[in-house]
Image (cartoon, helix red, strand yellow):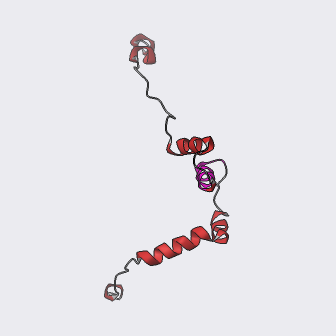
Amino acid sequence: MFKDVKKNPYTVDFSQEREIFNEIISNKNILNEIKKNIHVKNNILSDLEDINNLSDKNYIIYKSLYDKIINVGEFKNPKKINMKNLLGSAESYY
């Protein structure tokens, strides 16, 4: 019943995890296998992949992708909302 309690707890070896992560990133075969069942076209994943593949970060394309990825300037706050105009008069609801 208490067999699992006697085991040593799992310890994280960050250097080993770093090696595995670096292998995954550097090995195109592993990356392609991971991508097989993930939709990576026309979404944030394709934007991230495109920005990582750009060699010169001074291009307008890089800045455009960067803004798109972090959503800078995408939404503007309204200055002032007039609730009466938004909801209409109270008589129209009764």
| Residue 25 versus residue 39 in the image, above or below | below
- Camera-side residue of 53 and 78: 53
Magenta part of the protein: which range? 42-52
Q: Position of residue 6 (x, y in %)?
A: 32, 88
Image quadrant holding the N terminus, namely bottom left
Q: Position of residue 48 (x, y in %)?
A: 58, 52
Name which quarter of the figure residue 5 lies in: bottom left
- Camera-side residue of 87 and 92: 87
| Residue 78 versus residue 48 in the image, above or below | above
Q: Is residue 94 left or right of residue 53?
A: left
Q: Is residue 79 left or right of residue 25?
A: left
Which residue appears at 61% of the width and 44% of the height?
59
Does 53 lie within the magenta span? no
| Residue 39 versus residue 13 in the image, above or below | above
Which residue appears at 49% of the width and 33% of the height?
75
Image quadrant holding the C terminus, namely top left
- Camera-side residue of 92 and 54: 54
Q: Report how many numbered discs are placed on residues in the image.
A: 0
Name which quarter of the figure residue 85 lies in: top left
Q: Position of residue 11 (x, y in %)?
A: 37, 79
Q: Position of residue 44 (x, y in %)?
A: 58, 49
Which residue appears at 65% of the width and 62% of the height?
37
Per the picture, the main secondary structure of the magenta-coloured stretch is helix
| Residue 84 versus residue 53 in the image, above or below | above
Does 46 lie within the magenta span? yes
Q: Is residue 64 left or right of residue 89?
A: right
